[in-house]
Image: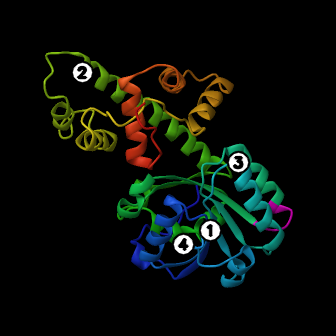
Amino acid sequence: MHQFPPSHRRKESPPMHIGLIGLGKMGFNMRERLRQGGVEVTGLDRNPDVTDVASVDELIAALPTPRIIWVMVPSGDITDSVISELGEKLNQGDLIIDGGNSRFTEDQKHAAALAEKGIRFADCGVSGGVWGLQNGYGLMAGGAAEDIELALPIFDALRPEGDRADSFVHVGGVGAGHYAKMVHNGIEYGLMQAYAEGYELLAAKDIVTDLPGTFRAWQKGTVVRSWLLDLMVKALDEDPGLASIDDYVEDSGEGRWTVEEAIANAVPAPAITAALFARFASREDTSPAMKMVSALRHQFGGHATRPAS
């Protein structure tokens, strides 16, 4: 196993200047956290109000070599387009890190195409949502050890203070970071569904007269305490009956991919699979539980909710 330099605090990281493409909610917050951590960042976005440069060419010209460019755009065609353009314009030895929610198989395609030009590639699953600027991000990286080591100051600036192993892992080769993030999100599906079903059961019983207080009392000392539970309490504080939220719940892909991987590897995953199917069911029937799932997704990730109909 590769041994990285000892874990250290962000302020001890050597100076670094990187490019960041994609300044949506998460990318914008990541740029700010990186800058607070001593990493110089030049950002590029289609939104002229937040971008630092006007084009990929300007971004590349602003960076020292070997360049490191972090891509934080929606998975799929947009990621493909950005990485393809970078592949045509970067030099040998430059490094691209895909920090979005790409499927791990796409990472392997990108890495193979870029390797033909001598351009390095790594992937990183990022967890923390809209709270990452304040709290730091959990990071799961995939790629060659020397590429991950080159980017350590970036990871150290993004993660929470404390031991690196508590919030950062080099999972393995290219694609491993996004594979770990996919499974992470699959687990998240199951956890949210369990909390939401408990919420609906409590709400259905007339002898329960303090529903928000029940969840609040679980926040310390119980075996089900978690950050998701904290966000559940916050959602109920903001809207005690979830009256403003529709029960339609989107899925962003990772849950489906997790179930597909479970099938491909003959690994039973009934809780995650049931949670995914519950989201499909939410698009057909009225469900207090799915209102809570929608509220939780909004709390941790800023995902849009549908107004109650």
The residue singled out by tag 1 in the image is 45
Provide the secondary structure element on which disc 2 rests. helix
**Mark 4 or mark 2, which is nearer the start of the sequence?**
4
Which colour style is shown? rainbow
- From the viewer's perspective, is the residue at label 3 or at label 1 nearer? 1
Which of the pair 242/19 is nearer the observer?
Answer: 242
- How crowded pointer 1 is (Cα within 10 Å; few <14, some 14-19, many 20+) is rated as many
Tag 4 near tag 1, CB within 8 Å: yes
**Where are the magenta residues, as a range?**
114-119
Please state which amino acid type lies under the numbered disc 4: Val
Q: Main secondary structure of the magenta part?
A: loop
Taking the magenta stretch, the answer to whether it contains residue 116 is: yes
**Mark 1 or mark 4, which is nearer the start of the sequence?**
1
The residue singled out by tag 2 in the image is 202
The residue singled out by tag 4 in the image is 50
**Mark 2 or mark 3, which is nearer the start of the sequence?**
3
